[in-house]
Image (tube, grey):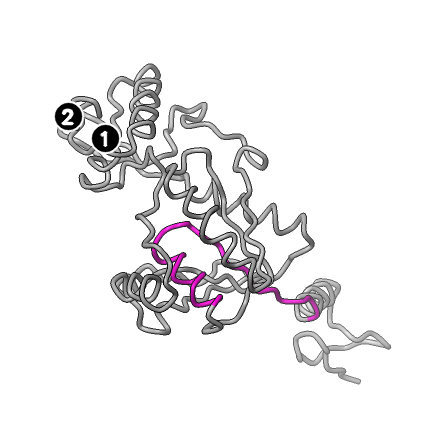
Amino acid sequence: MKKVCVGCGQRYDGRGESYCSRACSNKHRRVQERKNRKTYRVWSCGGGVQSTAIAALIVKGEIEKPDYAVMVDTGFEKTRVMDYVRKVLVPKLSEVGVTLNIIQTADYADQYLVDPSGFCIIPVFKKRKDGIKKMKTACNDKWKVQVIRKWLLAKGVEQYVSVIGIGAEEQHRQRKAHKKYYKNTYPLIDLGMDRDACIEYITKVAGWPEPIRSSCLICGQQDDGEWWRMAMIDKADFQKAVAIEKTLQQTDPSIFLHRSCKPLEDAFRL
C-alpha cells in the first residue's frame, strides 16, 4: 500500500515509516527545528549618520526596539565617530532600555591587513604599468559580519532579523539574505529617509548633535573631503593612516590608500 511521506509529500512503499527516506527525514527535522527557533531582532550600528538616525527612531519609538544592538570596533574607527557613539548613542539608547554592545574585531578574528597569499583585505589601489587598479576588499565580511555572527552565536542567537541602516538614496545596496538563519530589513528605506532626512531627524526631531560620516580611517573608499578632514582636523587619525600605509608598502610598494596612488602625506600635504 502506498503511503504519503510527511516530509516531501511523495507517495512511497513502506511499512510504518513516516518518511520516504532517511535523507527526507533529516531534511524535514532540520526545517522543523528552524521553524521552532526564536527569531531575534538585531541592529548592527555603524556609528554614522544613517545608524544614528536608526538610534533616534528607536529612542523616539518610531521603530521597534532591537533585542540586540551591536557595533564592531575594528580598531581603525575614527576617533570622533567613537566619541559620538560613546557620548551620545550609548546613553540615549540606554534611556529606553537598549544596550549598544561595542565589540572588538580582535577578540573574534585574526586581524591582518595582508593575508599569507599577499591579498590586502582593505580597499586599496595599486599602481601598475597599465594604470591604477582598485583592488577588491574583504574587510567588512571578515572584520564585521563574521564577528557579529560569532558574537550572536555566543549569546545563543541562531536566527534573527537584521536591521540595516541604508538610506533611501541607496536602495541599490539592499541585499537578500544568503543564509536561511537571518533576513535583512531596511527601515530607513521603508520610511523614505535619505541622508538629508536622516540629518534633519537627528538634529531637529531628536535634538542630537550632527554625527560625522563613519568609515575606517584607512578606508580607500573615502572621498577627498574625508581625507582632507582627517589631515586638517583629525590629525592623529591621519598620521595613523600614514603609518599604516607605509607598513603596507613594506609588503608591496605598489599599494596606496588613495586613488591617486600618491602617499597620503603627499596627496594631502597642508
Relative image position of residue 114 (x, y in whole percent): 41, 26
- Residue highlighted by disc 1: 231
Relative image position of residue 146 (x, y in whole percent): 53, 45
SS type, badge 2: loop
Magenta span of residues = 36-59
- Dot 1 surroundings within 10 Å: few (below 14), some, or many (20 or more)? many
Q: Nearer the viewer, residue 251 or 247?
A: 247
- Residue highlighted by disc 2: 270
Describe residue 139's horizontal placement relative to residue 92 as left or right.
left
Q: Nearer the viewer, residue 242 or 173?
A: 242
Extreme residue in the right direction: 16
Task: Please give the name of the residue rendered at 31% of the width and 72% of the height, measured from the top-left corner.
Answer: 192
Relative image position of residue 175 (x, y in whole percent): 39, 61
Task: Please give the name of the residue rendered at 17% of the width and 24% of the height, measured from the top-left corner.
Answer: 262
Check disc 2 and give the amino acid type.
Leu
Q: Could you say which quadrant of the image residue 226 lies in?
A: top left
The quadrant the N terminus occupies is: bottom right
Check disc 1 and give the amino acid type.
Ala
Q: Are marks 1 and 2 in contact (CB under 8 Å)?
A: yes
Does residue 149 belong to the magenta stretch?
no
Marks 1 and 2, the one that precedes in the sequence: 1
Query: Is the residue 118 above or below the residue 220 in the image?
Result: above
SS type, badge 1: helix
Describe residue 137's horizontal placement relative to residue 266 as left or right.
right
Alpha carbon separation for disc pair 1 and 2: 8 Å
Describe residue 94's horizontal placement relative to residue 31 as left or right.
left
Query: Is the residue 260 above or below the residue 154 in the image?
Result: above
Does residue 58 belong to the magenta stretch?
yes
